[in-house]
Amino acid sequence: MLGGSPALARREIDRPVATSVRWYIMSLVVATSVLTYLDRLNLSIAGKYIQDEFAIPVRTMGWIFSAFLLGYALFQIPGGYAADRFGPRRLFVVVITSWSVLTAATAIAPRLPLVHWFGLAWSFAIVRFLIGIGEAPSSPGYATVVAAWMGDGHRGVGSSFSMLGIGLGGAFTPIFIASVMQHWGWRASFYISGALGLLIAMAWYYFATDQPESHPSVNPAELELIRRGGKAPRAHREDTPWGKMLSNRSVIALVLGYFCQGFPIYFYHTWFFIYLVRVRGFSLIQGGFWAACPYLAIAILSPSGGWFSDFAVRRMGRRLGRKTAVWLGMSGSAVLLWSGGQTPNKFAAIAMLAVAAGLNMFAAATFWAACIDLSQKHSGSLSGLMNTLGNLGGWLSPIVTAYVATRFGWSRALALAALVTLGSGFCWLFVDAGRGIDEPSASA
């Protein structure tokens, strides 16, 4: 009989279809990532109205802006450790609730007791610092979700979901917040952002579990897909082997590479809008519109980078496959950063610089996948360490960029960003994602 025996055909028909719970879990990751950028960028949009209402000087406002990033960077490692120790579900419920309440509290910062103790500006800055602490566990928390829910063969794709959220959040937050402020004022934007956060925290509480084995809606067929080619993480939590981690050559190269990744990408979070208006000659409205382009590129290219990274691993092995994905993304990003800064055509510059941002995050998906490759059991701690360095690079970026731009011009500042981007790819000469620290004898 053509096509095999009737018994085999019946077994194929009777085989249960895998459920899709893992994709719903990853949609929660996307929603949480969008929320973090909503709560991160809302102050930058409301800042003009706050300055006007309370006569806050520009330099003082800069300190208020930077307070978030300081708290966010300092608490990456504790946040990653908490994700490993307590599991992502409880972690996200607690931290999303906390930072959402604090986001709403930004609207009443002028009336908090902090004003009497420290002054108005410090009241805003302290609230933003605490929001940064609250958001810090989110990125390493995503790594623990991907490690548990996406399986060995889809770590790149899984790691790209949070970056998809960054792209969507960065592109649509200005439109959403500006619309809310136009209708109800700047305070309403913080209240609504906080309320949305509480809804997402409830979704984590009622729908998510730390492991697919614990989820009542996951059937055996989906569990088989998730665990194919890999093992379920151990149920008990182990202490993070910091000594082994910090002495591992691949880990050192990975975190240094992510430091270099963070430097150019924070150009878009800080100076890109001002660059479009002051250097490229766009109006404020035009600048706000075109400033969304890098985030749209991120939303498109980061999932592509995750898919390509997994594809390259299947074709070339984990060691060379991960390297290839990073080298492709970072080299392309560096070329476009340099050429975008040199071209006299402002629309060509926007296109090049936007795709450069997308290619940066194309490569970044592999960094997060490599955290799981190198230590599935401690992926939260390792990703927290990596993201600490990435955000320190981001912290330096607006300072160094401003210095170079004022002394030597914006084209030189973008050329420097391109050079640092190449440095990120160079670090991957020393990363072997096929040899994890949990099992030193592992191979690709």
Image (cartoon, rainbow, N blue to C red):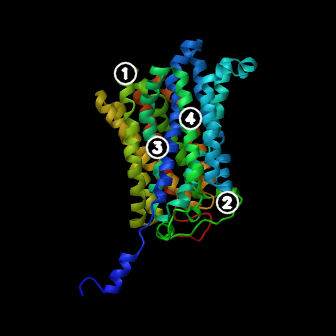
Question: Where's residue 240, x and y in %?
Answer: 69, 57
Label 2 Cα neighbours within 10 Å, binned few <14 / some 14-19 / many ≥20: few
Residue 244 marker: 2
Label 1 Cα neighbours within 10 Å, binned few <14 / some 14-19 / many ≥20: few
Identify residue type, mark 1.
Answer: Ile
* Residue shown at the point (38%, 51%) measured from the top left: 304
Identify residue type, mark 2.
Answer: Lys
Out of 225 and 160, give the one closest to the viewer: 225
Residue 195 marker: 4
136 to the left or right of 339 = right
Label located before the other in sequence (3 or 4): 3
Residue 115 marker: none
Residue 285 marker: 1
Image quadrant holding the N terminus, namely bottom left
Label located before the other in sequence (3 or 1): 3
Question: Height in image: 80 above or below 234?
Answer: above
The residue identified by callout 3 is 165
Q: Secondary structure at mark 3?
A: helix
The mark lying in front, picked from 2 and 3, is: 3
Question: Where's residue 436, x and y in %?
Answer: 58, 64
Question: Where's residue 444, x and y in %?
Answer: 49, 68
Q: Secondary structure at mark 4?
A: helix
The mark lying in front, picked from 2 and 4, is: 4
